Image (spheres, rainbow, N blue to C red):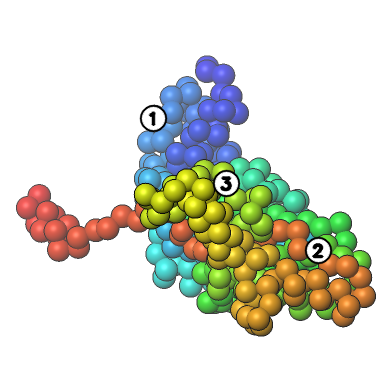
Amino acid sequence: MANISAAMVKELREKTGAGMMDCKSALTETDGNIEAAIDWLRTKGLSKAAKKSDRIAAEGLVTVAVSGTRGVVAEVNSETDFVARNSDFQALAKNIAQVAISTGHADAEALKAAAYPAGGNVADAIANAIATIGENMTLRRVTVLDVTAGRVGSYVHNAVSEGLGKIGVIVALESTGDAEVLGELGRKIAMHVAAASPLALEPSAIDPAVIVREKAVLAEKNAGKPAHVLEKIIESGLKSYYKEVCLLDQAFIHEPSKTVSQIVTEAAKAAGAPVALKGFVRYALGEGIEKQESDFAAEVASMTKS
């Protein structure tokens, strides 16, 4: 009899979405042959998520959760927006965010291995949802922000339920000041982030490659000018660019005559202590995912020919 390793069980489970014990039984019955085990599970009606894992899941929800000095934003994807409106899927997304709050896991793979409230782990819960609802689903990404003292503010745009929507933002404010003041400030800044979509907190946090590319654009636009003039144009152009893409330098949407940095500094008086904006995270549903475009008429035509 073949030695059934944990790695073999894991591989079969990922291929089929069946439960761990079912996978172990299948491998035992088939002497460790993965393909035969898949067929064994299918005959038993246990290959719940088979052939769904290669489908592109670009819909779904961004989920946000905050507990005092910790905030979480995660993206849980489904294949269709219809499933995103399913109450079971919404409960799954909310529970995943709560698991991230309690564990502090800021890595999707680590979070999948964490215990899930209803039993098993997060990966099991996702596999069960795939089996029940019938669509591929993925935990695409998760980010956690912590502050030693202060508050993490949040905002969800196009919310379908509390903490669930198409755009989710968390903002970390470090301060020993009044928590209520910090919470309101954090929410307003989070709304600003959702609308303005800053690239980074400050210039030093921008990817150097992005700055190189911006310099190249400025140089190309001003080609032919003397070197000393071009240098000043690029320097001035970068300053303008930073005001557009760096959160602290952006004009605050709620009070455009002031920058976000000025608003944070002024908040110290109301909070009763200095306030520092330590970081932010903005997730927009499906950003960066290449969606498959299907020609429904062509699909129907091809089916009639077969």
Q: Amino acid at mark 2?
A: Ala
Q: Nearer the viewer, mark 1 or mark 2?
A: 2
Q: Is residue 52 above or below residue 301?
A: above
Circle nearer the N terminus (3, 1): 1
Q: Is residue 220 above or below residue 26?
A: below
Image location of residue 72, percent across then percent down: 69, 60
Q: Nearer the viewer, residue 144 or 261?
A: 261
- Residue 94 seen in this snapshot: no
Image location of residue 290, percent across then percent down: 37, 53
The label shown at residue 85 is: none
Q: Residue at x 62, y 69 (%)?
A: 250
Q: How many marks?
A: 3
Relative horizontal placement of residue 240, taking residue 68 as reference (left or right): left
Relative horizontal placement of residue 54, taking residue 152 as reference (left or right): left
Q: CB atoms at circles 2 and 3 under 8 Å apart?
A: no
Identify the residue position indicated by label 2 in the image. Answer: 276
Q: Amino acid at mark 1?
A: Glu
Identify the residue position indicated by label 3 in the image. Answer: 207
